[in-house]
Image (cartoon, grey):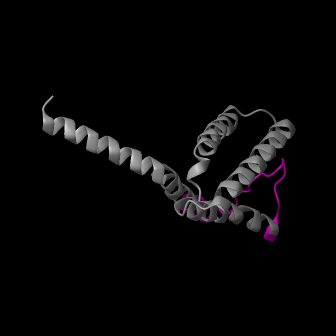
Amino acid sequence: MGPVEKGFRQDLSARIRFLWAQGIDIQALGILFLASGVVDFFWILAYPDYALVMFGQTFPGLLGQAVKFQHPIIHWIIGMGFLGRRRWAYWAYLLYLALACASETVTQISQGFHPLRTTLVLFSLLFAAYVIARRRVFA
């Protein structure tokens, strides 16, 4: 390996370490939260009769609409916090995850086991483990 290749690798390694220290991965997750909120929002608009199940219950009328629309709003708030690497976003995400997992557990107990939803919860917990491991980048 010549001096140019060696210099490039050292420079690339230094850049990767810098970006890692700056929490660029957490900011990318923030973008994913924002995109997820947009998808949720348009899903709700496209399927107005869709009833979000929370703690094994669906809610009719205006309360049901509020329950549905809180989901993309929470994603947008957490996404903006992750973009800014705000400490409150870390705690908001963990609270949101705990409530979502508790809700899904109650729903599955009351309505029956669903393998896809269980897989979603398991991947959410893995995602949370990553965010917890990266907690130091939240200012």
Query: How many marks can you see?
Result: 0
Instruction: Please give the name of the residue rendered at 74% of the width and 56% of the height, measured from the top-left corner.
Output: 51
Relative side of 26 to 57, left or right: left
Instruction: Please give the name of the residue rendered at 81% of the width and 43% of the height, measured from the top-left corner.
Output: 107
Point out residue 31 in the picture as x, y percentages from the top left corner: 49, 58
Instruction: Please give the name of the residue rendered at 76% of the width and 43% of the height, measured from the top-left corner.
Output: 101
Say which quadrant the N terminus sits in.
Answer: top left
Point out residue 103 in the picture as x, y percentages from the top left corner: 80, 47
Name the residue nearer the viewer: 131 or 58.
131
Relative side of 76 to 57, left or right: left
Q: In the picture shown, does residue 75 fall above or below 103?
A: below
Is residue 28 shown in magenta?
no
Is residue 59 shown in magenta?
yes
Name the residue nearer the viewer: 61 or 15.
15
Say which quadrant the C terminus sits in.
Answer: bottom right
Point out the residue furthest to the top here.
1
Point out the residue furthest to the right here.
110
Q: Quadrant of residue 110?
A: top right
Name the residue nearer the viewer: 12 or 74.
12
Q: In the picture shown, does residue 47 fall above or below 10?
A: below
Point out residue 69 in the picture as x, y percentages from the top left corner: 69, 65
Instruction: Please give the name of the residue rendered at 55% of the width and 52% of the height, measured from the top-left corner.
Output: 137
Q: State the extent of the magenta-drawn residues as a range.
A: 38-62
Name the residue nearer the viewer: 125 or 131.
131
Relative side of 67 to 19, left or right: right
